[in-house]
Image: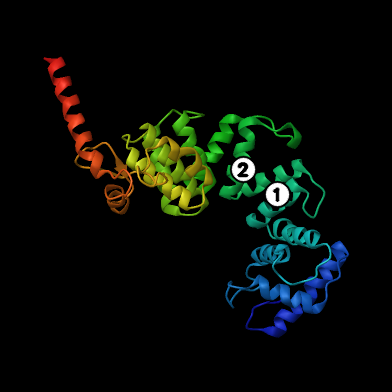
Amino acid sequence: MPACAAMDPEARRRACVEFRVKLSRDTGANLTAATCEELCAATFLGEGDSVTLESNPGRFYVSLGEAIEDQTLALVLPDRRKIAWWCFRQAAEVHGHSGGMLKLVGCLYTGRGVTEDLEQAVVWMEKAANLGEPAAKSFLGSILIHGDASAGVAKDAARGFALVREASAQGYGPALFKVAQWYLKGEGVAKDAVHAVTLLWQLIDQGGTYATMAQAELAACYYTGLGVEADTVQAALWCQRAADGGDEDAIHMMLPMIRTCNFCGTRPARQHCERCRKVRYCNTTCQAAHWNRETEPHKGHCRRAAEASQLEAGGASTSAQ
């Protein structure tokens, strides 16, 4: 296959001609030369000028398929999904690329560009897993744990748990999160909340979507004292971070269980009034605003509340005697 590097327009042109011929032969799709040139340009966007079809054909076809599926490209592509599927098949079948196999799995599982075939999807998933692809291990493992008759997969929980743990050890986010939950619940493994929290911290350090989910899970651990010392302030802090990261459930489901600011009522309380210790605030701004509020300022209640606390303490001391 000729080179298709950005630095060699003529080589790219020849590669695009060959791509058009093969695509037309295999799928009947006829793309214009200009369309193929634009697809090749999108394929190597950010890949670097040294990329060639000869050096990494599997990666080329995966990138090409992704570019074809990219709806933001202003290209008129008949049978867009079918052409993308063909590219992924080239990467998987012809060049043995594990990323192409995963893409092929997605097409076969959803019927995207090809007739849905769950059994074939599992076949390619197995091949990708055997090549060490963590996403394939995680996906296949999850299926094996319960089995899936529609995909022709018999239940093999032991292997399923092992595969997901392997993907977790490779740092794959979805698998890490799943294994952390297993250790929290004792599902398929010996219950170990401390280890689960360690995995959650690992996810948080990685960043991304699963880091946000780990923040919400960590908030629950702090709230219940599971794997860490119970700390409602830390629970509120991590819940708020998860909510800030886009986890809507964190703010709606958890913060009502955690004490919130007595002034604004919306943010988690992180400090309290040092005098009466009866009210809590999210920050000093809310504390000062509550202290000097025109109606029912806290400074009018603080002294009485403090005295009441002292009386309660005195009563408890007397009863003890």
Q: Which mark is residue 105?
A: 1
**Viewer-proximal residue among 7 and 236:** 236
Q: In this view, does 159 lie above or below 211?
A: above
Q: Helix or strand or loop: what does disc 2 sit on?
A: helix
Question: Residue at 72% across / 76% down in the picture?
Answer: 38
Rendered location of residue 17, percent (x, y): 79, 77
What's under tag 2, amino acid-wise?
A: Phe
Look at the numbered disc 1 and give the secondary structure of its residue.
Answer: helix
Q: Residue at x 56, y 30 (%)?
A: 158
The one of 311 and 255 positioned closer to us in this rendering: 311
Residue 151 lies left or right of residue 310; in this view the side is right
Residue 7 on image: x %, y %: 62, 83
Mark 1 and mark 2: Cα distance apart in space:
10 Å
Residue 1 in sight from this viewpoint = no
- Judged from this view, the residue extending furthest toward the left is 321
Q: Position of residue 280 (x, y in %)?
A: 30, 41
Q: Do the residues labelled 1 and 2 touch (CB within 8 Å)?
A: yes
Left or right for 243, reference 274: right
- Residues packed near mark 1 inside 10 Å, few (<14), some (14 to 19) or many (20 plus): many
Describe residue 118's horizontal placement relative to residue 97 as left or right: right
Q: What residue type is labelled 1?
A: Val
Tell me which residue sits at (66%, 44%) in the image. 126
Task: Classify the position of the N terminus by image quarter.
Answer: bottom right
